[in-house]
């Protein structure tokens, strides 16, 4: 039978008779030693990985923004849509197709110069002056909103990119905080073990500490999974694989929000102005289409020779110039178009007002949330400093038997909570600033 070994301050030794079950102090010491060895090995691996990373391969937020603008498939698709829409204008600025027709007389019409045996006709329609230019201008106007849609989509994607990046930064900082808390739990476990060894504490305290530490390790694993998913989102946005290393952004001076917001330069609001311009150009084209259209042409008539006599010009072909005028008789449909576009402009005005109100309220909410997060961050940092001092004193008192273990454990958990809340508050500052930039673009 194999003898059980436990760790003692003087090295490994055998348990007394009965094995580990009769030696709780040795069992706990052995458990702590094994866990410490595993943690030391894992920490060494992590340090090795971090030291072998190339800092030049890290991804600052500005470079990710540029990659998104250049590589995002949705933005590229809208660019091609815009170029395709611009190609419509040259198609509409051309004259209608030339019409050519002809016919052969089965029973030729007899004329003084001979029978008319065949006829060739050429006709060219001529719209009212300015109609073609108006059609081309309307097509160009309909293409312009695509540019603004691309700009609005870019702001949406940049906001998604930034919030995802800030989530990664927050998760990395939470992992650092939890790693520090693991160190504190290890030292707390050592204190509990020493008290158990001196018969002044309970082994339950050691197990409770280990349970807390296991929960922290599981939380770290969960955060790493969340970081991996967030990186997948960023790689989807920039359409390429990335080295998954972040640079913590600097806390900039908060952007001041003016009392009177000028949102007219936002792409979603510029779209409304372009839509109104489309309606006005539609009305202008409608007025031109209500006017007459012209057509010019000529008929070439093939004439046969007379055999019964020889008049001057016998069998001479004929050319017949033609001018036609097409007059719209029903003006109701043109009035209906004008009424439709007038109502459309009113709808656009109402939608613009709704979007302005939506943006204004969103900016105000974001500014309030950002200021509150900044104040909460200051408070939490002060609380962390106070708690660290209190925890140091409590650890000494616990080691001397003047402080209950539950109080010490409560202070430890409260310190972890405050650190996590401070990281969340910092993330809120970043995300709310990104939300403000989404509605008041500064880039």
Image (tube, rainbow, N blue to C red):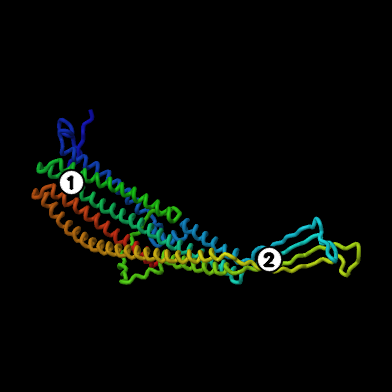
Placement of the C terminus among the 4 image quadrants: bottom left
Residue at 24% over, 58% down: 422
Label located before the other in sequence (1 or 2): 2
Label 2 crowd (10 A; few <14 / some 14-19 / many >=20) = some
Image quarter for residue 198? top left
319 vs 398: above or below = below
Mark 1 closeness class: few <14, some 14–19, many ≥20 residues within 10 Å: some
Q: Residue at x 16, y 50 (%)?
A: 410
Q: Label 1 to label 2, Cα distance in Å? A: 100 Å
Residue 67: % across, % down = 44, 59
Q: Which of the image's four quarters has the N terminus?
A: top left
Q: Residue 329 falls in which quadrant of the image?
A: bottom right
Using the image, tell me which numbered label, if any, was put on residue 124: 2
Q: Residue at x 72, y 64 (%)?
A: 122
| Residue 365 % position (x, y) | 29, 62
> What secondary structure is found at the residue carrying circle 2?
strand
Across and down, in percent, residue 337 comes to 51, 64
Where is 184 relative to 324, above or below? above
Residue 84 position within the rendered picture, expressed as x and y whole percent measured from the top left: 55, 60
For disc 1, the marked residue is 190
Report the front residue among 54 and 100: 100
**Residue in the foreground of this view, choosing between 350 and 416:** 350
Q: Please indicate whether residue 358 sits to the left or right of residue 12 in the image.
A: right
Of the pair 382 and 192, the residue shown nearer to us: 382
């Amino acid at each position: 039978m194999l003898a059980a070994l436990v760790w003692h301050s003087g090295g490994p030794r055998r348990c007394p008779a009965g094995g580990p079950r009769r030696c709780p102090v040795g069992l706990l010491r052995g458990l702590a030693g094994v866990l410490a060895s595993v943690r030391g090995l894992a920490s060494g691996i992590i340090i090795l990985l971090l030291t072998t990373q190339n800092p030049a391969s890290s991804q600052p937020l500005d470079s990710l923004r540029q990659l998104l603008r250049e590589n995002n498939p949705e933005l590229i698709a809208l660019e091609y849509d815009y170029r395709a829409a611009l190609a419509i204008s040259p198609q509409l600025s051309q004259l209608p197709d030339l019409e050519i027709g002809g016919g052969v007389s089965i029973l030729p019409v007899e004329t003084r110069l001979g029978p008319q045996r065949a006829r060739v006709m050429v006709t060219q329609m001529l719209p009212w002056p300015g109609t073609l230019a108006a059609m081309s201008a309307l097509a160009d106007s309909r293409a312009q909103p695509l540019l603004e849609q691309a700009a609005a989509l870019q702001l949406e994607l940049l906001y998604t990119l930034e919030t995802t990046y800030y989530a990664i930064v927050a998760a990395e900082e939470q992992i650092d905080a939890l790693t520090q808390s693991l160190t504190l739990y290890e030292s707390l476990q050592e204190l509990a073990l020493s008290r158990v060894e001196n018969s002044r504490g309970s082994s339950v305290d050691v197990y409770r500490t280990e349970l807390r530490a296991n929960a922290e390790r599981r939380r770290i694993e969960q955060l790493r999974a969340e970081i991996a998913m967030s990186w997948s989102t960023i790689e989807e946005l920039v359409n390429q694989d990335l080295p998954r290393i972040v640079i913590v952004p600097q806390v900039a001076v908060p952007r001041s929000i003016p009392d009177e917001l000028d949102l007219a330069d936002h792409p979603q609001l510029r779209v409304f102005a372009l839509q109104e311009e489309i309606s006005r150009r539609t009305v202008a084209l409608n007025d031109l289409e209500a006017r007459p259209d012209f057509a010019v042409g000529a008929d070439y008539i093939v004439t046969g020779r007379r055999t019964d006599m020889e008049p001057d010009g016998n069998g001479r072909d004929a050319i017949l110039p033609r001018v036609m005028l097409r007059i719209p008789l029903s003006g109701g449909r043109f009035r209906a178009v004008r009424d439709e576009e007038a109502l459309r402009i009113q709808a656009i005005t109402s939608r613009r007002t709704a979007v302005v109100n939506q943006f204004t309220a969103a900016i105000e909410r974001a500014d309030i949330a950002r200021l509150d997060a900044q104040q909460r961050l200051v408070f939490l940092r002060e609380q962390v400093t106070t708690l660290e001092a209190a925890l140091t004193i409590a650890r000494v008192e616990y080691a001397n038997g003047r402080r209950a273990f539950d109080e010490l454990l409560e202070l430890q958990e409260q310190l972890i909570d405050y650190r996590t809340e401070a990281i969340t508050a910092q993330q809120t500052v970043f995300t709310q600033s990104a939300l403000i930039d989404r509605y008041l673009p500064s880039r």
